[in-house]
Amino acid sequence: MGEPLPDPFGRGFERLCALRVRCCAMTQPFAQGEDHPACGICPAHRLPREGFVVYDRPSRECPFNPDDGLRYTADGIPACVHPDKVGVEPDRVAPPPEPPAQLVEEPRRRGWFRRR
């Protein structure tokens, strides 16, 4: 009649199941449920764990993008900056903050009127 049906317990079936499980796991958001403590704009609500990086705190290396509400690295990878809320260890450590700029003292102004 035709080719025999594949053995459901053969190697091909196991490979298919493994692919299906891995594929499904990669499409599920990491943070699921409305009661998850992650921020509302966190990429964990939209992406699987492999789809974003986690910094230990906010940083200039992953600036906020107001167009879609996410932070991005220079490579364009979405970033989370609250590892304690997501419940994972940070992937990257943010550099130390820049020191504040030295304030230049303005010259003292005399009173509002001048003596002649």
Image (spheres, rainbow, N blue to C red):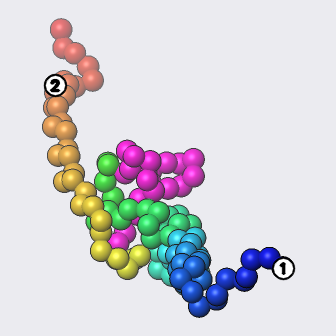
Q: Is residue 90 left or right of residue 50?
A: left
Range of magenta residues: 62-83
Tell me the crowding category of disc 1: few under 14, some 14 to 19, or many 20 or more residues within 10 angstroms, Cα based: few
Question: Image point 57% across, 52% down: which residue?
Answer: 68
Q: Position of residue 9 (x, y in %)?
A: 59, 91
What residue did someone put label 2 on? 107
Q: Which residue is nearer to you in this view: 102 or 69? A: 69
Q: Which residue is nearer to you in this view: 23 or 15? A: 15
Q: How many marks?
A: 2
Quadrant in the picture for the N terminus: bottom right
Mark 1 belongs to which amino acid?
A: Met
Q: Check disc 1 and report its element: helix, strand or loop.
A: loop
Q: Residue furthest right?
A: 1
Q: Is residue 19 left or right of residue 51?
A: right
Q: Check disc 2 and report its element: helix, strand or loop.
A: loop
- The mark found on residue 23 in the picture is none
Q: Is residue 103 magenta?
A: no
Q: Earlier in the sequence, mark 2 or mark 1?
A: 1
Q: Is residue 64 magenta?
A: yes
Quadrant in the picture for the C terminus: top left
Mark 2 belongs to which amino acid?
A: Pro
Q: Is residue 6 visible?
A: yes
- The mark found on residue 1 in the picture is 1
Mark 2 vs mark 1, CA separation in Å: 98 Å
Q: Which residue is nearer to you in this view: 81 or 75? A: 75
Nearer the camera: disc 2 or disc 1: 1
Question: Image point 57% across, 47% down: which residue?
Answer: 67
Tell me the crowding category of disc 2: few under 14, some 14 to 19, or many 20 or more residues within 10 angstroms, Cα based: few
Task: Establish if 106 lies above or below 88.
Answer: above
